[in-house]
């Protein structure tokens, strides 16, 4: 390994949607980023420099030992997605929980100073509503959330070094490359639909969400990794945006930006009638060793929607 070992980071799941965007942000912030991946070389994106790719399989302890060698901090993004967790909860536990246990053990054996685990806002239950802050007790329901909460407990129990847990809300923005699957994300899905001229929302549109543009996630993670040791004393950090819209508001903004870009406004449809009373609003409150900037969040929100729409220019013609 070349470079400053004190700036060496391993991104587990480094070529996924979050991984690709975080790798870019952390490189810009001056970190030496290594990508922990399971993909064969021919399935790697063009931006993944071969010397920075390390094969790392959560089912293979030896590969995790090799990947963690010479690394100061591990950012753990590798996990089974929500749909796969629902289809096979046993596999979800094997990958998300036992795989995390193997990774934490490898971090201990290789002297990794910090392990940052990416969890989800959904550990707080379903449906999400009201004020959710660092004092809100977790109440996971879906296998995706249940296994993330259990995996975070594994990280908290690690024997050496410092740990952190990020409970991330709904990130959005274009993927770094076409190999990263982001089509299931709310904003990304709506941007793809906008090219067809219709935004079809499955629900009634009054469902509350918390949304955070990907550059804000990258800045927060870079700040957390640069923070002093005593900042890593919290049990968990919530990471969300300053935007707590309802689904119809998200669709309206995407339609507005699509109209500005393509000269025609997509029609918005709803799968369910609007309820007599709106569900409670959501107020997801972030905490962590990073600064908040609502003005920057709002400007970045528009930029990420515009950049995501741009990926569908050809389909919109």
Image (tube, helix red, strand yellow):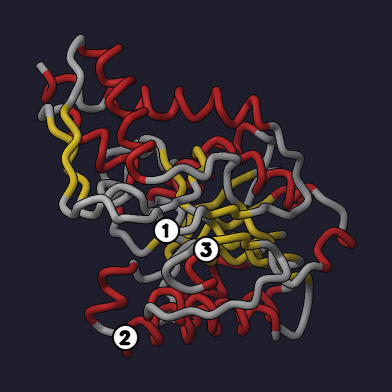
Q: Is residue 78 left or right of residue 109?
A: left
Pointer 3 residue: 121
| Residue at image coords 54%, 71% | 124
| Residue at image coords 79%, 67% | 234
Assign the C terminus to one quadrant of the image.
top left
Pointer 1 residue: 279
Q: Are marks 2 and 3 in contact (CB under 8 Å)?
A: no
| Residue at image coords 37%, 80% | 143
Viewer-side residue, 180 vs 107: 180
Pointer 2 residue: 89
Q: Position of residue 157 (x, y in %)?
A: 70, 86
Closer to the observer: label 2 or label 3? 3
Q: Position of residue 28 (x, y in %)?
A: 62, 32
What's the distance in space between the residues labelled 1 and 3, CA to CA?
A: 18 Å
Q: Earlier in the sequence, mark 1 or mark 2?
A: 2
What's the distance in space between the residues labelled 1 and 2, CA to CA?
A: 29 Å
What's the distance in space between the residues labelled 2 and 3, CA to CA?
A: 19 Å
Question: Is residue 213 shown above or below 138?
Answer: above
Question: Is residue 9 shown above or below 241?
Answer: below
Dot 1 falls on a residue whose secondary structure is loop
């Amino acid at each position: 390994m070349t470079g400053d070992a004190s700036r060496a980071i391993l991104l587990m799941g480094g070529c996924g949607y979050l991984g690709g965007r975080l790798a870019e942000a952390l490189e810009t912030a001056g970190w030496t980023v290594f990508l922990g991946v399971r993909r064969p070389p021919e399935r790697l994106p063009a931006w993944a420099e071969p010397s920075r790719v390390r094969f790392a399989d959560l089912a293979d302890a030896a590969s995790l030992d090799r990947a963690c060698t010479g690394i100061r901090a591990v950012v753990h993004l590798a996990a089974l997605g929500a749909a796969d967790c629902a289809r096979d909860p046993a596999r979800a536990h094997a990958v998300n929980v036992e795989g995390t246990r193997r990774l934490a053990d490898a971090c201990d054996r290789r002297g990794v100073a910090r392990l940052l685990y990416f969890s989800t806002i959904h550990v707080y239950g379903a449906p999400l509503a009201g004020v959710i802050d660092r004092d809100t007790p977790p109440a996971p329901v879906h296998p995706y959330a249940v296994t993330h909460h259990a995996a975070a407990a594994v990280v908290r129990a690690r024997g050496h070094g410092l740990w952190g847990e990020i409970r991330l809300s709904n990130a959005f923005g274009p993927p770094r490359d076409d190999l990263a699957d982001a089509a299931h994300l709310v904003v990304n899905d709506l941007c793809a639909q906008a090219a067809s001229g219709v935004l079809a929302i499955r629900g009634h549109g009054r469902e509350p969400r918390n949304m955070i543009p990907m550059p804000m996630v990258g800045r927060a993670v870079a700040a957390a990794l640069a923070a002093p040791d005593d900042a890593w004393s919290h049990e968990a950090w919530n990471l969300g945006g300053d935007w707590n819209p309802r689904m119809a508001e998200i669709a309206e903004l995407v339609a507005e930006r699509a109209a500005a870009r393509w000269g025609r406004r997509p029609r918005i449809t709803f799968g369910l009638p609007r309820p007599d009373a709106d569900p409670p609003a959501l107020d997801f409150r972030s905490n962590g060793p990073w600064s908040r900037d609502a003005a920057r969040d709002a400007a970045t929100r528009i930029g990420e929607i515009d950049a995501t729409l741009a990926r569908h220019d050809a389909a919109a013609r």
